[in-house]
Image (cartoon, grey):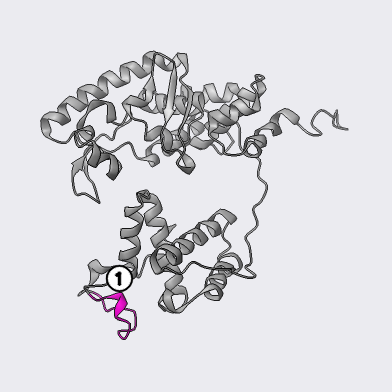
Amino acid sequence: MLKRFCRDRDALLPESAGKTKNLMDSSKPEFSTPDKPKLLERARDILRSRYYSRRTEEVYLGWMRRFILFHGKRHPRDMAEPEVAAFLSDLTVNGDVSASTQNQALSALLFLYAQVIGRPLADLGQVERARRPKKVPVVLTRQEARALLAQLEGAEWLMASLLYGSGLRLLEMLRLRVKDIDFGYGQITIRDGKGGRDRITMLPKGLTEALRRHLARRKLEYEGDVKAGTASVYLPEALARKYPAAASSWVWQYVFAAAKTSRDPRSGEVRRHHIDEVTVQRGVRRAAVSAGMTKVVTPHVLRHSFATHLLESGSDIRTVQELLGHRDVSTTMIYTHVLNKPGLNVPSPLD
């Protein structure tokens, strides 16, 4: 998404100084003086000081940049609610964005004005709101889920099985640490999930031995990283300062680690990150095609199927809500569409 509006990145970020002409009015030194870093650099520093994820940082900076370019590269300090409202409305009218995308842009601009500029936005007035269409989630039958998993093997099979068997979101699964797997109680702890909340979900008994074998192989890989001096993994900054040795310990290692080490873009340290989410997405799509499915299957469909199949089996909706980590039960209620089957019990005139 960011590729569409990052063409002028070098003109707005400080590392391109000397390469690209400053696009802002030189009479406004707040953008470029050594004492006052450029706006986007300051926003980035504040995002990091508040421990926002790298993904959120990139998205927020992208929306801030797009907002500035939309209004002819004017400084946001010289704009206010009317300009923000105009930008958000244009996203809907001309950009044809979804409601979630428009809300994401709004969140970025609220952060910009409240935390970076120091002038929180008031009432935005009349904003053309993107419509949030009512969508029914794609759900696999139990037979389809088994057929899909049968097309996978190794770590891909184990990751897809956890998505379906534990109801994890893709990034929740990829960010699992060794310490989050509790074989004794048969449960998985999800740390800092969506909305920054922790929760506990089930560890399927059928995956226990496969997961143990996988962790045994990971430990051998980890021991090799220790010898090579690349065993350190990413930890939140506050935690890394409090427990400096934790980053290189076994319990903090990613369960599903990348095949190769890479350089951390923030710290510059060479370390082993978790597997890229695109790898799992491609694997699941490929498995769906191999299984001859006509449904559009993504990793998140396995989570949808987890919830629906639990409800079909008679599980209480509040329990399913807790396992999924939904803040409100109304979000979980969407999975009852399979159970209710409105009108589907009425025989067709053709029959």
Q: Provide the major secondary structure of the magenta segment.
A: loop
Q: Which residue is more in the foreground, 177 or 211?
A: 177
**Magenta stretch bounds:** 20-33
**The C terminus lies in quadrant:** top right
**Apparent side of residue 246 relative to residue 345 in the rendered image (left or right):** left
- Is residue 176 in view? yes
Question: Observer-nearest residue: 173 or 302?
Answer: 173
Residue 12 percent across, percent down from the top left: 32, 71
Q: Amino acid at mark 1?
A: Lys
Figure quadrant of residue 313: top right
Please say whether residue 129 is one of the residues in the magenta stretch. no
* Position of residue 6 measured from the top left corner of the image (x, y, whole percent): 37, 65
| Quarter of the view holding residue 154 | top left
Residue visible at 59% across and 65% down in the picture: 92
State the residue position of label 1: 38
How many numbered tags mark residues here?
1
